Amino acid sequence: DKIPDTEILRRAKMPGIVVTTTMAQTRWAGHLVRMPDTRLPKKAFYSELKLGKRSRGGQFKRYKDCLKVNLKNCDISVDAWEQDACDREQWQKRIHDGAAKFKANRILQAKQKGAQRKSRQNQALGQKGIQCPECRKTFLAKIGLYSHKRTHNQNQKKHRSQKAFRAP
């Protein structure tokens, strides 16, 4: 069955993996902000590397870079997030609310993409649909029709072999 992942997550009443990791990373960042300055994780988080550089256009290699993306996804200000994280209850509420908005936006975007894809398919079908001569199923490309015809050929071979065994 062709069921979108958004529908499966809705039925299971669960957030997606992207939403879950975003929430976990932002919660951990808030925890780091509230740590004493002497703790090693906080020192590592706020320190800068002395050597090495990121190649131009390369992937994000620092936790801080990924955190900025997650904060934007959760609709939390990148400039003032540390002050918000000092209050634990308010920080948890902001993360929860932001993750809910992020989840809703992801579902909406997925539905819009699906609708665009279906409209393109419908337009293509209206212009140049190719029908199977045996079952009248319509295909967008010849390759789809060729592979579909193979199923008809396999079904015919099965019927022939069954008839051969049933003879006198």
Image (cartoon, grey):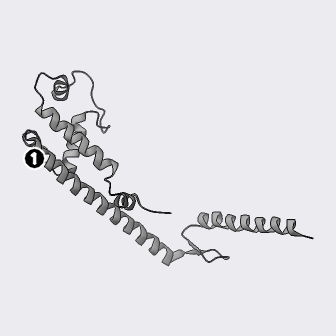
Q: Residue 71 or 159: which is nearer the viewer?
A: 159
The answer to whether 152 is drawn above or below residue 12 in the figure is below
Image quadrant for the C terminus? bottom right
Nearest the eye: 43 or 93: 93
Instruction: Give the image quarter of residue 28.
Output: top left
Which quadrant of the view contains residue 143? bottom right
Disc 1 marks which residue?
A: 90
At x 69% / y 64%, what residue is drawn? 150
| Drawn side of residue 98 relative to residue 58, left or right | left
Residue at horizontal 15 percent and vertical 38 percent from the top: 30
Q: Is residue 82 or residue 57 the one in the foreground?
A: 82
Identity of the residue drawn at 32% across and 38% down: 59
Q: Residues within 10 Å of mark 1 (few under 14, many from 20)?
A: few
- Looking at the rendered structure, the secondary structure element under dot 1 is helix
Q: Position of residue 3 (x, y in %)?
A: 44, 62
Q: In screen coordinates, is 127 left or right of 6?
A: right
Q: Is residue 126 above or below residue 146?
A: below
Location of residue 69 in the rendering, given as x and y in whole percent from the top left corner: 23, 45
Q: Position of residue 93 (x, y in %)?
A: 14, 49
Kind of residue at badge 1: Gln
